[in-house]
Amino acid sequence: MNRNPSQRRRYGMISLTASLLGLALFLPTADAGDRDPVGACCFPDGTCEILTELECIDLCYGDLNCDWMIDFEDINFFVEALQCPGGVGWPHDCLWITGDCDGDGAVTFDDINPFVERLGWVCPPGLGGEWLGPGTTCGLCPCDVLCPPGSVPEQELCGEDTNAGCGSVGPNAFEPIYADVPICGTAWYDGMLRDTDWYEITVAENTEFTLTVQAEFPVLIALVETDPPGSGDCWDMTGYLDPYANVGACEIVTIVSDCLPAGTYWFWVGPQFVEDTVDCPAEYWIELTTTPCAP
């Protein structure tokens, strides 16, 4: 009787697992010992995990010959890794810890089944983290803000002064913002002066505004209050920001307005007055959503 290919593959995996387990009986026992020190692993996408230094590096567990595939060519390397407890005597360029398929910090017999299950995988492109050292926390990671998909660049180049709104030198200059279209902007603060970006939208009906921002610097965001609301006239500013929010670098912050009448509204983004300067171009993104409402 001929078995179908999937059956042959399944029985082949069972046989391979059994063979590796049989070999394992004659190998020295790996002593995992204490796990290596852990610390902050900062990734380019702005995320962070607490990992060991090796875990932070660009690894594809099971790919012991570093060809970005986990296949039968890795088997001999995996068997050899089992014979090198703690990585001692491991002679290859690909890291010994790559054989740690169960994620316990060592290459041991417990990795055999997870390794077999990975055969046939193509390794995804890795992020490649930056390890800050033992005992470090994610709060120490540098902040790198990535613009959302579909975003457009701010019209003002960093260092220019073309959207300072009611604070403009010369004619008041605002930059248009549209609902559901993120904008990637830049800002700076030299310890005395700061860049302020004023975004303007006009709505034809009662509207609730939701503004979301993430910045590489401590940021202040706000809706500039006028009386009457939506007048679009700098002389009508009350001097208040309502609503507003202050947050630290890399934090995502959202403010939501009351139900406001039809009119023209300004949204303000800029660095906080803090001790550290903000070098140009420090990046941020801003996104506005609008919801019709009843007053």
Image (spheres, rainbow, N blue to C red):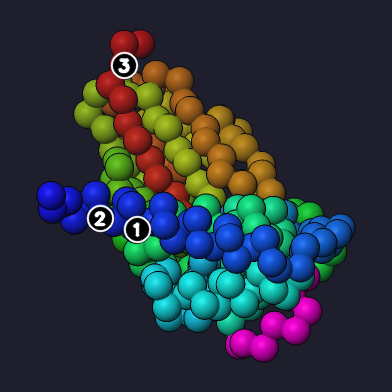
> Depth check: 131 or 237 in front?
131
Q: Above or below — where is 291 with respect to 288?
A: above
Question: Do the CB atoms of the residues marked 2 and 1 lie less than 8 Å apart?
Answer: yes
Q: Residue furthest left?
A: 1
Task: Select label 3 or label 1 by which is in front.
Answer: 1
What's the CA distance linking mark 2 and mark 1?
6 Å
Residue 12 is marked as 1
Question: Do the CB atoms of the residues marked 3 and 2 lie less than 8 Å apart?
Answer: no
Please name the residue shown 56% across and 30% down the image. 242
Q: Which residue is mark 3?
A: 293
Query: Is 87 within the magenta?
Result: yes
What's the CA distance linking mark 3 and mark 1?
63 Å
Q: Secondary structure at mark 1?
A: helix
Looking at the image, residue 130 sits to the left or right of residue 139; the answer is left
> Depth check: 70 or 140 in front?
70
Q: Earlier in the sequence, mark 3 or mark 2?
A: 2
Quarter of the rendering occupied by the C terminus: top left
Residue 251 is marked as none
The secondary structure making up most of the magenta span is: loop
